Image (cartoon, rainbow, N blue to C red):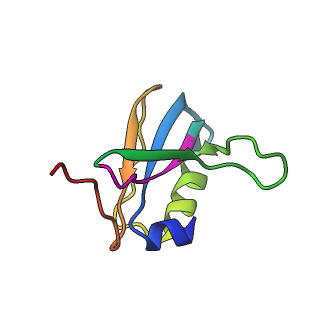
Amino acid sequence: MQEAIEGGAWIEVECVEAPEKGGNTHRGGWTVFVCSNDGQGGVHRSVYVTNRDLKPRVFKTAAGLMSFCLELDAKVFSCPLREGERGTWEFETTRYPTSG
C-alpha cells in the first residue's frame, strides 16, 4: 500500500456499518480502498485485504481506523458516519486523475 501511496494513490474509506457508541468507544464497520489514476483519466479502486485470508479488512472501531490513518501518514482523517458514505484520505503525493 505504501508503494501505491508514494506513486500518487489516495485512500477511500467506506462505512459498511454505521457506528454506535459502546462504552468509551464507537463501534461500526469501515472498509478501506486504495485508489489511483488509471492512466486514462479514470480511477482504479482496490479493496484493502488481510494477508491471512485475502478478505476485505473491516475496521471495527473509529479509533482503529484513525490509528491506521496515522500509520499511513495521511494529511486529514475522514471517517464517514452513515452506511454507504465515503471519506477520502489524501497524502503529500496524491495525484487525482485529470480530464484532458
Between residue 16 and residue 42, name the one nearer to us: 42
Image label count: 0
Between residue 35 and residue 28, name the one nearer to us: 35
User: In this view, which residue lies farthest toward the left?
Assistant: 100
Up-down relation of residue 93 to residue 14 (above or below): below
The x, y position of residue 15, in whole percent, is 50, 34
Up-down relation of residue 27 to residue 9 (above or below): above
Q: Residue at x 40, y 37 (%)?
A: 86
Quadrant showing the N terminus = bottom right
Between residue 14 and residue 55, name the one nearer to us: 55
**Residue 38 sits inside the magenta stretch:** yes
User: In this view, which residue lies farthest toward the right?
Assistant: 52
Q: Is residue 27 visible from the viewing direction of this image?
A: no
Q: Residue at x 42, y 61 (%)?
A: 9
Task: Tell me where residue 28 sits by quadrant.
Answer: top right
The x, y position of residue 30, in whole percent, is 56, 39
Q: Is residue 73 visible from the viewing direction of this image?
A: yes
Up-down relation of residue 14 to residue 44 (above or below): above
Magenta segment boundaries in residue numbering: 31-40
Q: Which residue is drawn at 33% across and 73% down?
A: 92
The x, y position of residue 40, in whole percent, is 32, 50
Up-down relation of residue 94 to residue 63 (above or below): below
**Residue 21 sits inside the magenta stretch:** no
Between residue 64 and residue 44, name the one nearer to us: 44
Prevailing secondary structure class for the magenta stretch in the rendered image: strand
Determine whether, in the image, residue 24 is placed left or right of residue 95: right
The x, y position of residue 80, in whole percent, is 41, 38
